[in-house]
Amino acid sequence: MPAAAQQQRQDRRNKLSLLAPADVSVIPALYTTKKAAEITRALLVPGELTWRCDEISMYGRRVKQPRLTVWVADPGVTYRYSGITMSPESWTPQLVQIKKDVENAAGCSFNSVLINQYRDGNDYVGWHRDNERELGPEPVIGSLSLGATRFFDLRHRDYRENKIPLQRYELNSGDLIIMRGTTQQYWQHRVPKQKRITETRINLSFRMTRP
């Protein structure tokens, strides 16, 4: 086969790979509404977790993150993103059990969880990919929602050029969404503002992080 034809075929393969759909699955009600409410209340008990509100760089200036976070992981497993380095807190018995439940649902193991608290609909996280080097090239992210129902959006990184529509999920308390494969290479995700929401949402984003 001529070199030009080989290159054309490879370019087509690369484009098809680039445009592959996001490998995302939703498991509704991993926890019942009642159980999810119990877990949410327990995680919000003062002193149960050490919530922090770090500064990040946004449009050339330092601003407070529009949410609270906690990093829980095995000893020595730190997490770095947006200029922030998070040292791990220890696993609580409740978080260990949640981790086991999410591992069983996802069919893989995790050694860490980033916990986000969205205090109301004004808190959010913008478009991003969980593509840090510590997570590896094709990480599995198991994301558990607790509390307020919120939107979870996905968009392809080349959505404009290829006219790929946004994907929107409405996640209820107790729902689990799992992202796999090349999703973090080609797709961004966010939790947008929803100003009418007054309740708190907690998201537990489990992953395997390399020390």
Image: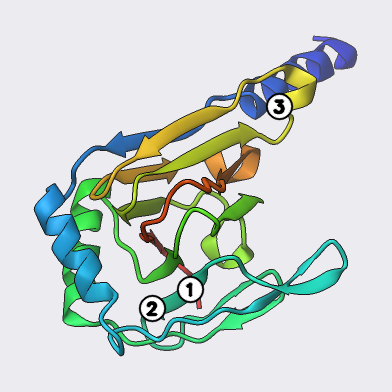
Q: In which quarter of the image is the N terminus?
A: top right
| Residue drawn at the location 19% of the way across and 66% of the way down | 39
Q: Is mark 3 on a helix, strand or loop?
A: helix
Give the x, y percent position of residue 181. Answer: 48, 41
Pair 2/1: label in front: 1
Report the residue marked by disc 1: 69
Q: Which residue in the structure is indicated by mark 2? A: 72
Residue shown at 64% from the left, 38% from the top: 186
Residue 159's place in the image compared with 95, above or below, is: above
On screen, residue 26 versus residue 20, left or right, reads: left
Mark 3 or 1: in front is 1
Mark 1 crowd level (few <14, some 14–19, many ≥20, 10 Å Cα)? many
Mark 1 and mark 3 in contact (Cβ < 8 Å)? Answer: no
Give left or right: position of 181 versus 165.
left
Which three-letter amino acid code belongs to the residue tagged 3?
Answer: Tyr
Residue 6 as seen in the image, left or right of residue 106? right
Instruction: Give coordinates of residue 18: x percent, y percent.
Output: 66, 28
Residue 148 is labelled as none
Q: Which badge, 3 or 1, comes first in the chain's sequence?
A: 1
For the residue pair 54 and 180, the one nearer the viewer reads as 54
Whether pointer 2 and pointer 1 mark residues with C-beta atoms closer than 8 Å, the reply is: no
Q: Which amino acid does label 2 sit on?
A: Val
- Image coloring type: rainbow
Q: Position of residue 95 (x, y in %)?
A: 24, 73
For the point 38% across and 78% down, which residue is it?
A: 73
Q: Mark 3 points at which residue?
A: 159
Q: Distance between the residues labelled 2 and 1?
A: 10 Å
Q: What element carries label 2?
A: strand
